Image (cartoon, coloured by chain):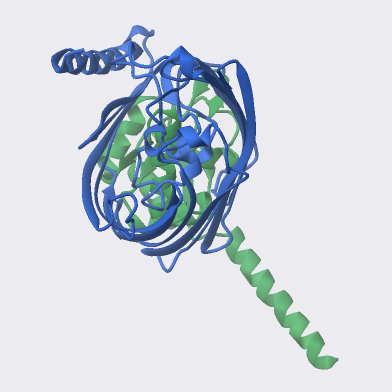
Amino acid sequence: MSDIRVAWSRFACLIVGFIFPYLAPASPVGGELLVFPAIQAENRVNAAQRNDGGRYDSDIAADLFYSHDKGSLLSLVEFFLGQDEQELERFQLGFSVGEATQVWFGRYHSPLTDWNITYHHGRFLQPTVANPAIVDFEDGGGPLPTHLTGVMVSSEFFRGDRVYSVDAGLGLGPSLDQGTLSPLDLLRPHQGKQSLSGALRLDLESLTGEYKLGLSAGYAQIDRESPDHGRIQQSVVGAYAHWRPGRAALSSEVFAVHDRLHSNGRDRDNTFLGGYLQGIYRLGEQFSPYLRLEDTWHNHNDAYLDQLADFVDQKQVLGLRYDFIRQQALNLEYAHTHLAGEYFDDWRLQWSAVFP
Amino acid sequence: MKSLGRLLVCLFLMLSAAGVAAAEPDPATAVVLVASPGFPLPDTLSVSELRRLFLGIPVYRGREVLTPLINASDKDLYQAFLQKVMFMSEANYQRQLVMRVFRRGGKRPEVFRDPRKLAQAMMVAPLNITFMTREQVKQLKNVKVVQPLW
């Protein structure tokens, strides 16, 4: 598809997303536009084997989010604009059923991981610069589907200050192309060969944000670029916990991933565990030092992980966030990373914000 | 033993005084939930419902959804509302609002820094609801006090 056609497709999606809610009978109209800009500088050292030791990199990105409700009709559009990547991140049209249930159609964030549905490209919202490897985006080397295209049902139930929520999604997940998972691109739907994927999530959280507990499960059929290379069946169960005692905040997410690789008439089964533990301490209203430990277990000779070129199996992250002005933050972060048999270090400096 | 008795008496008197102070707030600074005169709500809102409402989570009465308006015309009032009702700092509250919309769509509650614009907005729809001091209520016509907050 030519660049002009892609640009026109994006424009058409924005227009459709905007006018869809006006099709409903008259009722209160609401719309929200959010812009998440971020500028990041990164310096990688001690990566001799990967030939990118001493590499300096910078990135300017903006995530444009728009949601609009009218009566029971809902729409949500999100574009990610980066230096190397421009993507129609989310395009959802839906309707509400009853008081607290939403049914969405389109491309959405998979509810398999809490990090994914809470932060994703909203960089200002997330406490750290880098994502945990186990929940990283498909093109960042993440092993789990983070985007689905199909239908999603979300429902919430309230008991006092407790919120129980259920999110269930079913649709097309990623394919595996050239060592990277590749979700369906709505603007280039002919690229890749995506198959069925689904995720279910149950959460319990407090309205005041003091705690959150979640369980998730997912299934994905991941086709590789050619039928000769076979197919991967992936089953995932995960658990999430967040606790905010006083000025501290502790978060952890753990997944057990079973993958079955069908290739050349035989199956190879593997199960690995992956997760992270993150701690943040607020010093006053502005400074928040943080530490995150990430690890993967039973991943040696995993036939699926061996296909992923950028999967990070161990990482330690240490950083400081400085919320210097209303809804703007600076992060300085150090990460010690293990990737493809080699350790290296990254220094990252990021400015992020949300407007308005 | 005597000193323990005195201590208990003192403690009782202090708690009693605090209880009286809490039960009878200063009329000038007492804060109430208000709506337009056409507001159809027969019953009051619980604290949990108030939190949901001002976090942008739909709160229904019958088939009608309430619309929260944030009164930021008085900084002290706004801060007290965040502390006493939302149990959050302003930065955390703003963050929770953005996170909610980013995940589930919808819209953040509208913020009013000008009391005249807030008063006008209250008249637009009968389900609009906000909080203000009794002093502010006195200066406005055609608003209905739904319930005291503190």
> Residue reaching furthest right?
B1
Left or right of A59 on screen, residue A178: right
What hue does chain B carry in this figure? green
Q: Residue at x 65, y 65 (%)?
A: B19
- Image coordinates of residue A277 in percent, x first then y, are 56, 54
Q: Residue at x 32, y 41 (%)?
A: B111
Left or right of A215 on screen, residue A264: left
Look at the picture and state if B70 lies above or below A335: above
Q: Nearer the viewer, residue A163 or A160?
A: A163
Q: What is the number of callouts on the image?
A: 0
- Image coordinates of residue A226 in percent, x first then y, are 42, 15
Q: Quadrant of residue B139?
A: top left
- Image coordinates of residue A243 in percent, x first then y, are 59, 53
- Report if residue B37 is visible in the image: yes
Look at the picture and state if A227 lies above or below A319: above
- Image coordinates of residue A187 in percent, x first then y, are 28, 16
- The quadrant of the image that shows the C terminus of chain A is top left
> Residue reaching furthest front?
A264
Left or right of A275 on screen, residue B28: left
Q: Residue at x 42, y 46 (%)?
A: A131
* Chain painted blue: A
Q: Nearer the viewer, residue A1 or A228?
A: A228
> Residue reaching furthest left?
A4
Q: Quadrant of residue A284?
A: bottom left
- Report if residue A71 is visible in the image: no
- The quadrant of the image that shows the N terminus of chain A is top left
